[in-house]
Amino acid sequence: MAEQFDLIVRGGSAVLPWGTEALDIGVRDGRVAALGVSGTAEAAEVVDAAGLIVLPGLIDPHVHLRDPGDPAVESIPSGTRGAVLGGLTAVFDMPNTGPAITDEERLAWKQDYVARVSWCDVGLYVGATKANVAELPELETGRGVCAIKVFAGSSTGDLLVEDDESLERVMRAGRRRIAYHSEDEYRLRARRGLFKAGEPYERHMEWRDEETACLGTRRLMALARETGRPAHILHVSTAEEFSYLGDYRDIATVEVLLNHLTQVAPEAYEALGGYAVMNPPIRGRRHMEAAWAAVRDGTVDTIGSDHAPHSKAAKEKPWPDCAAGLTGVQTLVPVMLDHVNAGRLGLGRLADLMSAGPARVYGAVGKGRIARGYDADFTIVDMGKRRRIDEGWLASPCGWSPFMGMTVRGWPVFTIVRGRVVTREDEVLGEPSGRLVTFS
C-alpha cells in the first residue's frame, strides 16, 4: 500500500542543515514526516516544486505591526498578510503599540487576537518599563512570548529604560535573552540642540551618530556581563559595534537589518528623503561593508526588517519631525534573495540567518530547519525569477516601501505554514490560521 501524507512537496531542492539536496518532503499533521519520500507515495495535496528552492520557513524576528494602534497604517491582519506574500512563515512583533504590551491584561488580549486574525505564526515581545520590573519574570514565560524588549534609547512614553540602575534591575528580573535597542539616550538628548528643523534628512545620521550607537552597546555589554543576562543587540549598524561585539559572544547575539545591508548614505537620503529616516540611521558605505563582513564571519545571528510603517504624511514632514521607521516585512525575502543571486551570501547562510538563527536565539520550538518532527514551514522560491517591487503588490495600508521600483532576482512562489499552503504565486489562500509560536 502506498505511503500516505497530508502534503507532499515534490521535485524541489531542499536547503537542509547539511546542504542542498533534491528530494521530496512528506508532511503529516502539520509537521515534517519524511525526507525523500518515494515516487509512489500519495497525499491529499501535492505542491510541484520542480525547478524551485525549498527553504525552511523564513522568519522576520523584528516587526512593528502597530496593533493595537492605527489600522490605517498597519495591523496584524494586514502585516501578516504581507509577510506570507513575501515568503515569511513567522514574524515576531514588537510591543510599542498603542497601548504598549507591558502587562498581563494587554498581553492576553494580543495572544487571543493573534490566534483569530494572523496569516502566519507570530511571536510577541513584551516591553520592559521602569514600573513593570517585578512582573517581567512571569511575563517572559507567557504564551507566545519571544523576548523582553528594552528601549535603552529612542522611545516614547514609559517604554524608555535609559539609566544603568533601571537597566540592571530589568536584567536581574528573569532569565531569558533580552532584545535591546541600544542607542544612548543621554547622548541623543545632548546633541539634539546642534541641529535645526528643516535641515536635510541626511542630518539624521549625524545626530544619531556612530558614538550614540557604540556608547549604548558598550554600556549594555558591561551590564550584561555583570548580571549574566543574555542579550540580543538589535539592528547593529556600525563597524565599531560589529568589531566590539565579537568579544562578547558568550553573552550576546547580534541582529542586522536588511536596510543596513542594502542602503547607503548619502545616496539613500538623496533619493528617498524622509522615506530613508529610521533608527538607528542608514549610514555610510564603510558601515555597510562591515555589516556584510559580519554576516560572512558569523558575527551576525539574525536578519530582520524592523518593519515600522507610518503614513505617507508622517514620512513627508520636514526633518526631524518626519516619523522614523521604514516598511520591510513583505520585501525582506525578495531583496535578500537578490543579495544571494549577487553572490553576497549563499542559500545555506540565508537559511541560517533567517530561519535557524531566529529559532536558536529566541528558543522557537519546532522552527528553524527542515527535519523530521519540525513544523512543516517552507518558503519555496524561484531564484531565477525577476520582479519589480511595486505599490500594487504591497499589502500594508500605508502603501509605500523604501524599495519601491527596485527590480530583484529571486522571488517567493509558495509559503507553507505548518503544512498548509498559505500563498501560491502572489495569491493568499483560505482563511487566517496563524498561531502563536511556542518558545522554550
Image: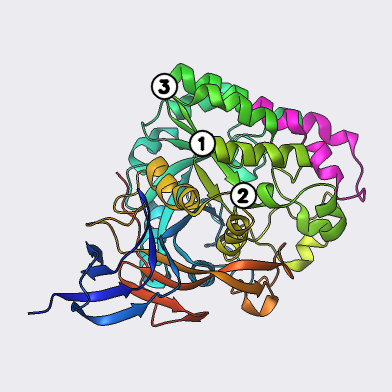
Q: How is the image coloured?
A: rainbow
Q: In percent of the image, x 51 and y 23: which residue is there? A: 248
Look at 87% across and 55% down and name the residue there: 270
Q: State which tag comes first along the sequence, 3 or 2.
A: 3
Residue 287, by quadrant, is: top right
Q: What type is the residue that disc 3 sits on?
A: Gly
Q: Can residue 121 be seen at all in this image of the molecule?
A: yes
Q: Disc 1 and disc 2: Cα gap in Å?
A: 14 Å
State the residue in front, 211 or 134. 211
In the image shown, does 108 or 336 lie closer to the viewer? 336
Mark closer to the observer (1, 2): 2
Instruction: Residue type at mark 1: give it.
Output: Gly
Residue that numbered label 3 is attached to = 228
Do we see residue 317 in this rendering? no
Query: What residue occupies the far top of the structure in this picture?
Result: 226
Q: Name the side, left or right, on which 11 lies relative to 400.
A: left
Find residue 46 and report its image quarter.
bottom left
Q: Is residue 340 left or right of residue 420?
A: right
Q: Position of residue 28 (x, y in %)?
A: 20, 69
Secondary structure under tag 3 reads loop
| Quarter of the image that includes the C terminus | top left
